[in-house]
Image (spheres, rainbow, N blue to C red):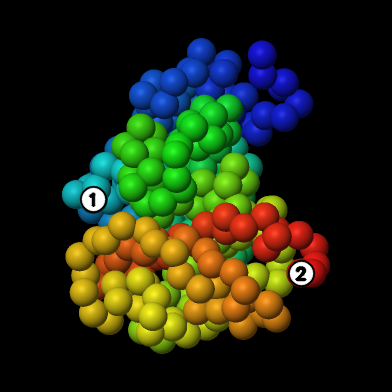
Amino acid sequence: MIASSSLTKAECKLLDLGITEPSDIDVEAIAWVEGVRVQYGDLIGCEARLVGYGDQGIVTIQKGFDERRMRFSIAHELGHWNYHRGRSFSCRADDWVEGYSTKPIVEQEADEYAANLLMPAFMFNPLARAIKRPTFDSVIDLAAQFNTSLTATTIRLVESNTWPLILVSHTAQGRAWFKRSKDVPDRWFPQKDLDSDSIAFDRLFGNQERIRAQKIGAEAWFDSRGAERFDIVEDAIRISSSQVLTLLWIEDIEMLEDKIR
């Protein structure tokens, strides 16, 4: 039994529609129920546009993109429809990934709605807890089940707090952004520049082939006092020609304590 008090607006919508499985999340059908018609066309300067009048709206999605990217665009615009009705929006599908922590609050709210609609916690968290190891191989499997992008799914995994994780994005210019699970103490703050011994460094500047996650000294990622005493599990994957994502799994329980002994 799911406690309604713990559900988000998007999750309540799914349950109201009788949707309890990831494969049943049809965002176009959900949009139709909410009075929003989805159409595809050519847009200039954006990947999605929402216009509405009263209780009727139209979402236009730039045609030709990856299905998962377009699904997120629709869900994001439905977030605007639910929280910011009466305004028009033009958005990029990857706005929430590139500097999402500093974007306007209305965009953050739409992102959150999209994540809750496409990967509702009551479906996502049990599957996340069931994975054997929190690596990109597991994330790829989760992304396939929810038909969501690798980046969005990894962020969802980190935010679910089912595993003690840190997700870091790097470009050649250094750290672009990072996200920690709630259980990871603030002192574990990833360094700006990649250590040459890290998998991420190799993925970004050298060998682009995927290799399995492996242990690495925590000092390669953190300059916090005592980091040299611990090992962490690092996995890295290149998501574009200029960006690499790294998933850091903190296995050692002592690293999760408020203070290092």
Q: Residue at position x 24%, y 48% from top?
A: 66
* Location of mark 2 (residue): 260
What residue lies at 27% left-to-right and 61% top-to-bottom? 211
The residue to which callout 1 is attached is 65
Is the residue 260 above or below the residue 118 in the image? below
Task: Say left or right for 154 vs 100.
Answer: left
Q: Is residue 126 shown left or right of residue 187?
A: left
Image quadrant where one finds the C terminus? bottom right
Front residue (pair 24, 217): 217
- Viewer-nearest residue: 236 or 173: 236
Q: Amino acid at mark 2?
A: Ile
In the rendering, at what x and y percent does residue 116 appear? Answer: 55, 37
For image coordinates 20% across by 65% down, the residue present is 209
Residue 198, x across and y down, in percent: 39, 76
Where 125 falls versus 2 (above or below)? below
Q: How many marks?
A: 2
> Disc 2 on helix, strand or loop?
loop
Q: Please state the horizontal and vertical placement of residue 142, each as a whole percent of the image.
A: 39, 38
Work out whether mark 1 precedes mark 2 in sequence or the reverse, and give the earlier one: 1
Q: Where 239 falls versus 227 (above or below)?
A: above
How many angstroms separate mark 1 from mark 2 (CA)?
47 Å
- The answer to whether any part of residue 186 appears in the image is yes
- Amino acid type of the residue tagged 1 in the rendering: Phe
Q: Residue 60 appears in which quarter of the rendering?
A: top left
